[in-house]
Image (cartoon, helix red, strand yellow):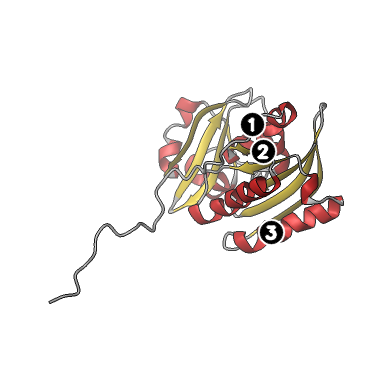
């Protein structure tokens, strides 16, 4: 089963083709470009490139998997709108995966892990995972100092992700160089059981965790004297 995997919840704009079989997940093609200001410009060419590399057509796709965030409003919606539109046009199911969950899967089991991506405004999107890789707290958005104050309570021993790297001095945890961004492999793996089962498609609901900066006006100012 050929699955298109998309994620635009971080500065890394990711598109990949994954083959989901009864035995596992194999990536057949992947493109990733890191640019926090060009999600819209980068995603469509990346999709075209992975299809071409794998010798596949959109009609060959069985399903789409998309990272749900959390992430900044503008970038995150690029991937989700693209996935939802393609799913509707191709009449194939779409499945959502938490982007922090994918980072947690990339970090590996065997230790309690804090996963953090950069939420801007001097904040991080974060979640905590236990030794089995199960999420035990989050997702949430907070200042790094607030999360640092919960490290003992959460029992985490290492932190991963772009947010963890940026605020390592505040979090006070070891931060390996990788993983930095959610991988296409982890996103596909977390959705694989739904793909294999032919589960009904899901509405792709973004995890913004806070309101956008722009809001609609609630009233009209009179221009009459």
Picture quadrant of residue 2: top right
Q: Earlier in the sequence, mark 2 or mark 3?
A: 3
**Quarter that holds the C terminus:** bottom left
* Badge 1 element: loop
Q: Earlier in the sequence, mark 2 or mark 1?
A: 2
Residue carrying label 1? 200
**Quarter that holds the N terminus:** top right
Residue carrying label 3? 44
Work out whether 98 lies above or below 81.
above
- 50 left or right of 159 in image: right
Report the front residue among 159 and 124: 124
Q: Earlier in the sequence, mark 3 or mark 1?
A: 3
- 1 left or right of 212 in image: right
Residue carrying label 2? 93
Q: Residue at x 40, y 39 (%)?
A: 146
Relative image position of residue 57 (x, y in whole percent)? 81, 51
Work out whether 57 lies above or below 193.
below
Q: Residue at x 59, y 25 (%)?
A: 134
Alpha carbons under labels 2 and 1: distance apart: 6 Å
């Amino acid at each position: 089963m050929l699955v298109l995997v998309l994620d635009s919840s971080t500065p890394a704009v990711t598109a990949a083709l994954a083959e989901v079989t009864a035995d596992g997940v194999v990536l057949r093609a992947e493109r990733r470009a890191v640019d926090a200001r060009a999600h819209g410009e980068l995603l469509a060419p990346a999709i075209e490139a992975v299809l071409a590399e794998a010798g596949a057509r959109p009609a060959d796709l069985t399903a789409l998997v998309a990272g749900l965030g959390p992430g900044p409003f503008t970038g995150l919606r690029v991937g989700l709108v693209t996935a939802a539109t393609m799913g509707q046009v191709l009449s194939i199911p779409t499945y959502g995966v938490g982007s922090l969950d994918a980072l947690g899967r990339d970090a590996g089991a065997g230790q309690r892990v804090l996963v953090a991506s950069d939420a801007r405004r001097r904040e991080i999107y974060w979640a905590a995972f236990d030794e089995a890789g199960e999420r035990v707290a989050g997702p949430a958005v907070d200042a790094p100092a607030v999360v640092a104050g919960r490290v003992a309570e959460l029992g985490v021993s290492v932190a991963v992700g772009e947010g963890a790297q940026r605020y390592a001095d505040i979090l006070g945890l070891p931060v390996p160089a990788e993983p930095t961004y959610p991988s296409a492999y982890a996103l596909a793996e977390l959705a694989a059981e739904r793909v294999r089962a032919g589960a009904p498609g899901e509405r792709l609901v973004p995890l913004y965790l806070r309101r956008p900066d722009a809001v609609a006006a609630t009233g009209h100012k009179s221009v009459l004297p």
